[in-house]
Amino acid sequence: MRTKRVAAVAPGAGLQLLAGIAMATSTMANAQDQYQLEEVIVTASKRAESSRDVAVAVTAMGREQLEAINASNFQDFATYVPGVSSFGLGVGQNQVVVRGVTTGAQSSSTVALLVDEIPIGSSSAFAQGAYALDYNAFDLQRIELLSGPQGTLYGASAMGGLLKYVTQAPDLGSFEERLQAEVSSSRHGRTNYAGRMAVNAPLIRDQLGVRAVAFLEESGGVIDDPGRGRYDVDSSKSAGGRVSVLSKLGEHADLRLSATYQNIERDGSTMVDRNSLTGRPVRGKYQQSVLLDEPLEQSIRLYSAVLNWELPWGTLTSATGWQELELNTDADNTALYGALFGTGSAIPFNTPVANRTEKFTQELRLASPSGGTFEWLVGAFYADEDSRNRTQLRNWLDPNGNLGGVPLFKGELPTTYEEIAVFGTGTVHFSERFDVALGVRHSEDRQHYRQLFQGVINNPLNPLAISDNGSTSKENVTTYLFSPRFRVREGVLLYGRVASGYRPGGPNFVTVTSTGQPIGNPTFKPDSLWNYEVGTKTTFLNGRATLDASVFLIDWSDIQLTVNRGGVNQLENGGEAQVKGVELSGRYMPIAGLTLGGSATYTDAQLTQDSPALGARDGQRLPLSPRFSSALTADYLFPVGQSAEGLLGVSYRYLGERTSGFDGSLARPQYDLDAFNLVDLRIGMRLPSFDVRLFVDNVFDEFGEVSALSTARTVNPAAPVRVSIAQPRTIGLSISVNLSH
């Protein structure tokens, strides 16, 4: 495949573009209508402030927006957010990608994930931390996504951006109950069901309250495997809930205690088989062919305590979290290892993986009051996680999984990770219109890792012996932030941003050759990136329209790569990359009740240095990074009678063509993912205590290729590529009952 080069956006041209946008919109005549867009308050910068004032590209989707697009999990809202793509195998297994910062399937995430104040997931590369939690979106207050590195405030793994789920806090003044039932049917699949409930109750009015959420969702699946007589193999069930208690501790302090439980069970993956050369279905369009089941079970238990204490000279916040994460998966790897051992499909091979992580986090920070000449925030963060990852390569026909009487591979990876950090930001207001923010964070990361391996792949000389290798690593990393902000006039903001981020390094897997010599490096380093960005945020037409624009340049170095050495995946640093892009987003309310929204992103993400570990060359595109993506929405609320409202809505999403690997790479074989368009429709009626909504997602039943897995082609070029797909056309009905007093 020939690599295409796209002309870069010159920094000077980018500044001129943003200045032109800001001035053009600011000089538009203001209308005197009473209606305007609702102001959105975000907290991802660790202060509650309007999204229009935050000097960073931020997307916030509130509860009404999430319900309008029928969002239940990550894949439901991902394509509405500028610059976001993903690598996914199905619900419960999604890797979030922001602004193209990815090498495809990764061992650890480049995007930080938070639930309220608590970071979720492992920072270690050995604990399946790359898969973001599919947090259920029902009754959320909003979802916030900050693009670009957020290393100063959030530390490890926030190099690509930050995704934050903000839950509804208890209302201390009123009782509320929401019941929601949903039924839908997906083409090529079975019926889907969902039941959800949220209850808010003030136990002591204005002093103590509780909010509880429960949900049960079942997806009927759309993928068939007729070779085994299995149909709708990707069916899944998600169940759980959360409880939050809010207590006022006097006039100036409050304490919020929260607990979340969620469990996802999935029978198989959402992947279908495609010919690696033609991209055509190997069998049916919505069919796969595996010899063994590929189930998944993911669970989370999250507990948190957040204290806010308003002092005369600042706000003290303490956020304490404890989480227990479990991920159990199984994969059919017959195509890969059948070729490696020369057995073809005569012997099925599977790789069950069981991972458990327990993590404690504590953050303590102090923030000055907003306003004044100098605003500051200082804090300290501590994380302690303990993970255990068990995996095995099994001959499925043998009770012990052995081949020829010896184990192929058994591995257990007990890992501890500890992070200690101090951070601070300060904003100097030189005038009412111009200020500069500076930030710094220093982190010390420590990892201890044991490798308990047995089998012919790890030790050909003595496959029955259990090798016990261990290593400890310690790293000191400092990240920085510099961000000037200039208010051209009321409603027109220009900002610049220079920021850095990183992912932790650590000890590495150790395997040996037939001569007993180790393969690979004993450690791998942190990778890091710098982001250079200028942007504008404009509000005009008397608050009825907003337009955000940003131009960015990202330099990524010491990229962490997963490379197979002797049949065992290892982590190595190799190559550099650069990402250039432009993001636009806006909203407009032309008449009362009608809200139009849209976003468009251009991204040019490519290697700027050869990567021998991948077999990839300078100039090749980074995987899963579309050059163009966009989303458009229109929602119209109109009166019906005296006490009802009608709802009409339409959405359009476009995700451009992407790659899944690199041309000529044996470690990450290439597959081109086609662009796709999705159109969604919705119509409904809102009464004071009753809502009904009919929706059609993917109206034209577009076949959307989300991501691809081509691991088997590393040793078997004829093996099909496994492609994860978007949900086919789905028609559904949702009914909600809302009671409050």
Image: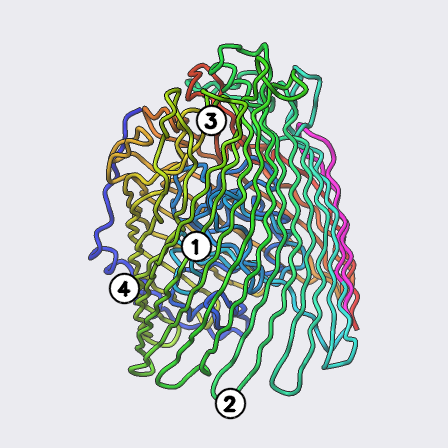
Q: Is residue 67 left or right of residue 95?
A: right
Which residue, given by chain and number where applicable, does mark 3 sit on?
A: 458
Circle 1 or circle 4, nearest the eye: 1
Residue type at numbered disc 1: Arg
* Magenta range: 175-198
Q: Residue at x 72, y 51 (%)?
A: 240
Marks 3 and 1 close (CB-CB < 8 Å): no
Marks 2 and 4 close (CB-CB < 8 Å): no
In three-dimensional space, the C-alpha distance between marks 3 and 1, rounded to whole angstroms, equals: 26 Å
Give the image's coloring scheme: rainbow
Residue type at numbered disc 3: Asn
Which residue, given by chain and number where applicable, does mark 2 sit on?
A: 312
In three-dimensional space, the C-alpha distance between marks 2 and 3, rounded to whole angstroms, equals: 61 Å
Foreground of the two, 222 or 166: 166
In the rendered image, the vertical position of residue 716 relative to residue 623, given as above or below: above
Residue type at numbered disc 4: Ala
Circle 4 or circle 3, nearest the eye: 3
Q: Residue at x 67, y 45 (%)?
A: 695
Q: Position of residue 473 (x, y in %)?
A: 40, 50
As drawn, the label of residue 446 is 1
In three-dimensional space, the C-alpha distance between marks 1 and 4, rounded to whole angstroms, equals: 45 Å
Decide which of tag 2 and tag 4 comes sooner along the chain: 4
Circle 2 or circle 1, nearest the eye: 1
